[in-house]
Amino acid sequence: MARKIKYVMSVCVSLMLSGCGGQALDEAKDASTFPVKENAYVTVLPWGGTENEDPSSELENLTIQGLYYKLGEEIGFGYLGGMYYDADADVYGMWLKQEAYDERENRELTACELALEQAVEDGHLNIRIGKYSTQELSAFQNQISSLMSENGIFATGLNEVENKVSVYVNEEMDFSELYELIPEDAVLIQYISGSVEFVDL
């Protein structure tokens, strides 16, 4: 039977699930060839149809988001850890797994990789090394669904700003079952104050 979660709290649900991080990205390891802006206020940017861009388009006609998807096609989406937009600094951010850097040391960079490096040099993009791909984070998020409601978890969201899964819980949450399912460093805990009512549909 389908269940609907009805939130009665001061936090806006759309903001909750947007992936807006409440912590700095100080756990991330900087890629030595890419500058990183620290402690920037970040907001997830709607993609606005970017995924529908023609992958055969010339690289110079692709947006940074388009280059991100093109890179995924070239090296595999298992190396990509998400992308976001820093509204205050007007710069995109993206995560690559360390393996992407290890692998590229033994080959010539693709035109897409060179275009992304140029975007970094031009100040339009920051690249960070993350531990998890979005595929892995999505799998973690699906695993967490088995703990929803009964164990104090009210919602989850893929947090591409922090390269984690945001998990929204009450203050009495017992995390032992959660961390038996997924690694602790893949989770960003967000506490919810107020009442939550579960309604059967």
Image: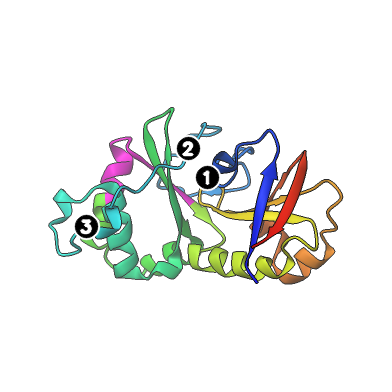
| Viewer-nearest of discs 2 and 1 | 1
Question: Mark 2–mark 1 contact, CB under 8 Å?
Answer: yes
For image coordinates 72% across by 60% down, the residue present is 184
Q: Circle 3 sits in a helix, a strand or a loop, which is it? A: loop
130 relative position to 180: left or right: left
Residue identifier under label 3: 53
How many C-alpha atoms fall within 10 Å of the one at disc 2: few (<14), some, or many (≥20)? some
Q: Circle 1 sits in a helix, a strand or a loop, which is it? A: loop
Residue identifier under label 2: 43
- The colour scheme used here is rainbow
User: Residue 82 magenta-drawn?
Assistant: no
Q: Return the x and y of residue 105 as percentages of the image width and height.
A: 38, 65
Name the mark on residue 9: none
For image coordinates 27% across by 62% down, the residue present is 70
Give 198 or 176, whichever is nearer the viewer: 198
Give 109 or 160, whichever is nearer the viewer: 160
Between the residue at mark 3 and the residue at mark 1, the CA separation in whole angstroms equals 23 Å
How many C-alpha atoms fall within 10 Å of the one at disc 3: few (<14), some, or many (≥20)? some
Between the residue at mark 2 and the residue at mark 1, the CA separation in whole angstroms equals 8 Å
Write the start and end of the magenta stretch as one range.
116-128
Residue identifier under label 1: 18
Which quadrant of the rendered structure holds the C terminus? bottom right
- Residue situated furthest front in the rendering: 201
- Residue situated furthest top in the rendering: 88
